[in-house]
Amino acid sequence: MVAGRAGAPLASGARKRISTFLQISVTDKREHMTRKMLSFESFSASIVVDGQPLNEYNVETSSKRGCTTVTCWIASEAGKQYKVHWKDTACTVANEGAVYVDGAYCGSKILHNGHNSRVKIVQGIKTSPTSLRPFEFSHLNMTDNEDAGLEMPINVGQIELRFRRWQRVCATGKGPSGGISGGLSLPAERTFNEKAKKGIDHQTKFGEAVGIPISKTTCGRATGEAFLQFHFRYRPLAVLQAHGIAPPPQTTSSSSHSSRAKKRPREDSTGDVKLAVRDIVEIESDDDDPEKEMERLQARMNELKAKHGDRVDCKKVKREPDERTVKREGGSSIGPLFIDLT
């Protein structure tokens, strides 16, 4: 039974939704941690982008019918090319590591016994003895055409590495022949119906062909069924973070400071505005004729109203603390301004 974060069992409907979106199977062992390389016993593997292994989240290990499967989630970025790295530090027997991308076979590498320090790399599909098409994360090809089908294959958005024992049956030679094909046909590009997306945003496409040297080939065959599989399920980082698979992005103090700095200053709730220094009316108290002084002030007020228009009419004027007030004898006012001649 699947349990929630606090250990309480989830309802059947919730289990179904989680299984549909994330396509997660319940396994024997789950480790909630971030790794740089999947490992089991002496075998290890990773997906490498720009020379660095991708973080691996929610590593799960299960066993069925003699085969151990180690599964994780990785963050994919559309347009980025990637490589599959793997090694066996014990290497007591020869093993084949076969790569499957979105369910399609894309080639294999043989690691012979005694070569425990070597890292095998599969960086794309070999289309001829001298050319290769690199792996590249890409957005899903979507359509609203019902003929595209409403079922999303379970292995889309997944890189698989399957290990089997390898048995040599002839000598090693140089050239495209000798037991291993010199090239593979590209998998057909697929288009999916928009209704079948189910949380899968990326698939793998194959980049422009690059030249490669002719490599040594080994005559032999893989024997028995796969005894170990590594599964890398890839999704955009934002999708993994939104569903708690990858940790949320961390906010730095500098970004918080810049965010606060960008906030607009709060305006006064009363809507008061302060006049510019040049608009402040200076009052001279030694004028001998109060009537003339009032006429001059009234003319100045009319000038300010004409200059500021509606802004002066609809907003209150916040006076400077040291501005002189003017009062008229008898306490009566003459509008918004008062003259005190005492």
Image (tube, rainbow, N blue to C red):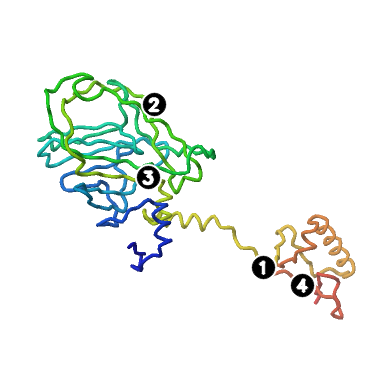
Element class at badge 3: loop
Q: Position of residue 155 (x, y in %)?
A: 36, 42
The answer to whether mark 1 and mark 2 are in CB contact below 8 A is no
Q: Which residue carries the number 4 mark?
A: 325
The answer to the question of whether label 4 and label 1 lie on touching residues, with beta carbons closer than 8 A, is no
Residue placed most toward the observer, 148 or 200: 148
Name the residue that disc number 1 marks: 269
Q: Are marks 1 and 3 in contact (CB under 8 Å)?
A: no
Q: What's the distance in space between the residues labelled 1 and 3, CA to CA? A: 58 Å
Q: Is residue 17 left or right of residue 287?
A: left
Q: Amino acid at mark 4?
A: Thr
Where is residue 126 shown, x and y percent of the image? 30, 26
Residue shown at 40% from the left, 41% from the top: 77
Looking at the rendered structure, the kind of residue marked 2 is: Glu
Which dot, 1 or 2, sits closer to the camera? 2
Q: Which residue is mark 3?
A: 154
- In the image, 254 versus 212, the foreground residue is 212
Q: CA distance from mark 1 to mark 2?
A: 62 Å
